[in-house]
Amino acid sequence: MARGISRSASTVLGAGISAAVLMSFVPSAGAISGTLGAIDGTVFFDRNGNGLIDRSTSGGEAGADKAEVRLYNANGDVVADAVADANGKFRFTDLRPGTYKLDGSQSGFISTTDAERKVEVRSSQTEFVRFGVRGGSISGLAWVDENGDGIRQDTEKAYADSRGFTLTGATDHYGKFTQRTAKVDDKGEYSFEDLPSGRYTVQTTGPDGSAATKSEAGPDATTDSDFTGKTGTVKSEKIQLAPGGGMVSLDAGFSRTTTTN
Ligand SMILES: [Ca+2]
Ligand SMILES: [Ca+2]
């Protein structure tokens, strides 16, 4: 979708106000029949895919920052593009009454509501529209592999002091390189959510004097390590995420390279 065509709400609102003033003082202007309408909307990360904004899902389903929405008229011509704000909210103002179509699909995400929506704009009314999209996720934990076998036994605790995980990867849906960091929780687990499709690498740092333990020592993917590196900073293979795809148990096991007591 084309970028940079978004009109700021204030600019459009300003035009709407001046048109209304013009009409009230110069009734014969006649260029605009009736008053104008607007469309308000939200694009949100619908993690559980139910089409609704749930507040309780993993700390709440957030608005899709910088999501792009395109507005067409009844003839299928592009009227305007909007870029959502940090809360996933977008707005089209100054619209003549009539039938419009909105496209709220987001590249790299799965739409969980109808991606295209027909909207009837009426005089002096604001219509409300919501688009849900589901992204991918990558999660796992870090642990110290005390016996160096590449497998996490029950006695080997998660490394909760981990300095967090960094994700680098594909350009996101609005063309910027993605780099995010995630802290580990009290169980030593990390997760990256609402990711566009693409190729990602995860990196983290272990205790001083450690390196990656044997990777892919399997056969159980939930207890082996998926990171490599001869120093304290280790990284995963490249992860290919399809739209809405999930990677769990991307775990980093550390073995000690020096003895510290
Ligand atoms: Ca939901
Ligand atoms: Ca072990």
Image: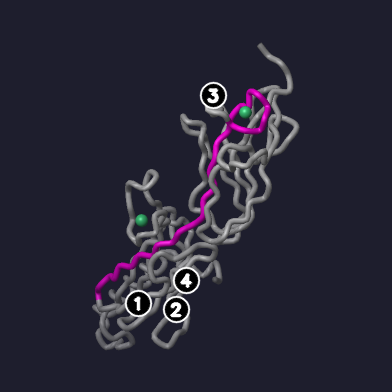
Tag 2 residue: 79
Which label was assigned to residue 81? 4
Residue 91 seen in this snapshot: yes
Q: Which residue is mark 3?
A: 155
| Snapshot quadrant of residue 8 | bottom left
Label 3 or label 1, whichever comes before in sequence order: 1
Q: Is residue 152 shown left or right of residue 103?
A: right
Along the line of sight, the residue nearer the viewer: 231 or 93: 231
Image spot of residue 210 (x, y percent): 69, 25
Q: CA distance from mark 4 to mark 2?
A: 7 Å
Depicted 237 relative to depicted 240: above or below: above
In what element is the residue under mark 3?
Answer: loop
| Secondary element at image label 1 | strand
Residue bearing mark 1: 95
| Residue at 39 percent of width and 55 percent of height | 48
Q: Furthest residue to the top?
A: 261
Residue at 26 percent of width and 78 percent of height: 122
Mark 2 packing: few (<14 Cα in 10 Å), some, or many (20+)?
some
Classed neighbour count for the residue bearing mark 4: other residues with Cα under 10 Å, few (<14), some (14–19), many (≥20): many
Q: Is residue 17 above or below residue 194?
A: below
Asked whether the viewer can see residue 160, the reply is no
The quadrant of the rendering that contains the N terminus is: bottom right
Q: Indicate the amino acid at tag 4.
A: Asp
Q: Nearer the viewer, mark 3 or mark 1?
A: 3
Residue 13 sits above or below residue 35 on the image: above
- Kind of residue at disc 2: Val
Label pair 1/2, CB-CB below 8 angstroms: yes
Q: CA distance from mark 1 to mark 2?
A: 9 Å
**Mark with earlier residue (3, 4):** 4
Amino acid under disc 3: Thr
